Image (tube, rainbow, N blue to C red):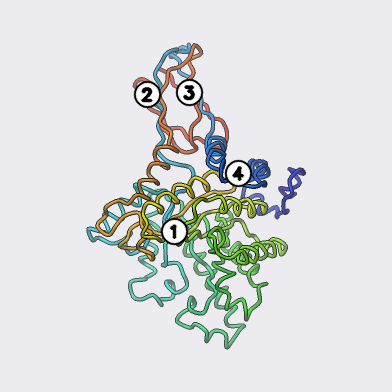
Amino acid sequence: MSIVEEYPGLTMIPISEQTTNICGRFISALLLLIGVMQGAVSEDTWRLEAQQRIEQIRKSDLTVRVTDVDGKPLSDMPVHVTMIRHAFPWGTCVKAQRITGDSPDDAIYQEKVVELFNCAVLEDALKWNGWHGAYGPSFTRENTEAALKWLKERAFRIRGHCLVWHGWENLQPWGATLADDLPDLRRRILEHIDELSEFTRDYVDEWDVVNEPVNVNEVLTVLGEEVLARWFHRARAALPDSCRLFINEYNIVEPFSAGTRDAYEAIIQALLDAKAPLEGIGFQSHFQLPPESPVEALQVFNRFARFGLPIVVTEFDVNTKDEERQAQFTRDFLTAAFSHPACTGFVFWGFWEGAHWRPDSALFRKDWSEKRNLAVYRDLVFKEWWTNETGNTNAYGEFALRAFKGMHTVIVGNQEKVVEIGDSAAKMEVIL
């Protein structure tokens, strides 16, 4: 059955059983919330409405019950609940050479990655050009695997970027000469998907199978858009079922061309019609001069949420020298994305000026001094959206609260326990 059959009151696009299984209970539970967001987003009320949604969808109930060894409830016992890790993926792209390097800057880089994020994507090492040596001798498969291992050992959620980026400049060292033999071009791309999938299957949790199908489409021009579905099927056959398959594009939430949004929507629809195993939608989110508010972006989230697929902000940055405006928009866009029930992850496209494709976008300057946009990120992710609650048990020996989804420590007396807060209400018992 399709998700739309479970909620007949919503106007949704049916998706395959396989995609439904991959998306799991998350999408099933949140489609109703998406449904009520389909109206206009107001400039006057968006922030308050976003805060209300965050409270509703990013938290769950936790009840801590404290008893003595005989099972008698203990009242008026202090309970302290502190978050230690978000369930929501907060990520960045990283350079493999920095992850494995041993310079003083590399050491700081690695420290900040662990301090600030729980999700990462190798910026260039898994692209065709990095994989086939076209980016130079510093890109080796041994170093790429070492970086993936480093991230996996630290329990990072790892995104793969990208299996197919179908412009000639992204298919070096052969480039446009590949168009001289179309059967060979088809074979090379399928073999590349197989090879990368096998190499990363123990590390990568979700892959951008297709990158920029609207804006970079030279290969599609000669092979036809129907190859997109074949690439998804090939990736699905080669990767574990747990690895989610994404499409990724820019100028979707950015205030540029409405035509890009239309074309992206049409490609997604065509893939679903072809029963391709498309399981997630990527919004790159590269902003130049940022808009005054994220209201238009929220409307775009609503528009694409109708597909019933998870949406990830995959490559966020704000490229401006106006650090005050940069910080304000970063706060607003983080809030808007985190508040949307379809959004399942948020990834910055770099964080340090010394290793950033758009240095003005970074969170740290070259000397590692912190910018205002980093302060905004810390304030939201590690303060406002971070559980840190203390209270006393009631007459029934219980302390109840709403906690952000993720891992928490619970301290009662000399007892300290770890509890994971998920989509369902959680209960735990502490015996003193």
Position of residue 93 measured from the top left corner of the image (x, y, whole percent): 41, 59
Are there few (<14), some (14-19), or many (20+) residues within 10 Å of tag 1?
many
Tell which circle, 3 or 2, labels the residue nearer the N-terminal end.
3
Q: Which mark is residue 121?
A: 1
Are there few (<14), some (14-19), or many (20+) residues within 10 Å of tag 3?
many
Q: Relative to residue 55, is residue 21 drawn left or right?
A: right
Position of residue 15 relative to residue 199, above or below, is above
Q: Which residue is farthest bottom?
A: 180
Question: Which residue in the structure is indicated by mark 3?
Answer: 64
Position of residue 92 measured from the top left corner of the image (x, y, whole percent): 41, 55
Tell which circle, 1 or 2, labels the residue nearer the N-terminal end.
1
Q: Are marks 3 and 2 in contact (CB under 8 Å)?
A: no
Question: Which residue in the structure is indicated by mark 2?
Answer: 415
SS at circle 3: strand
Q: CA distance from mark 1 to mark 2?
A: 37 Å
Q: Label 3 is placed on what type of residue?
A: Val
Q: Are marks 1 and 3 in contact (CB under 8 Å)?
A: no
Tell which circle, 1 or 4, labels the residue nearer the N-terminal end.
4
- On the question of residue 344 being in view, the answer is yes
Q: CA distance from mark 4 to mark 2?
A: 33 Å
Q: CA distance from mark 1 to mark 3?
A: 37 Å
Tell which circle, 4 or 3, labels the residue nearer the N-terminal end.
4
Q: Label 2 is placed on what type of residue?
A: Gln
Q: Label 4 is placed on what type of residue?
A: Phe
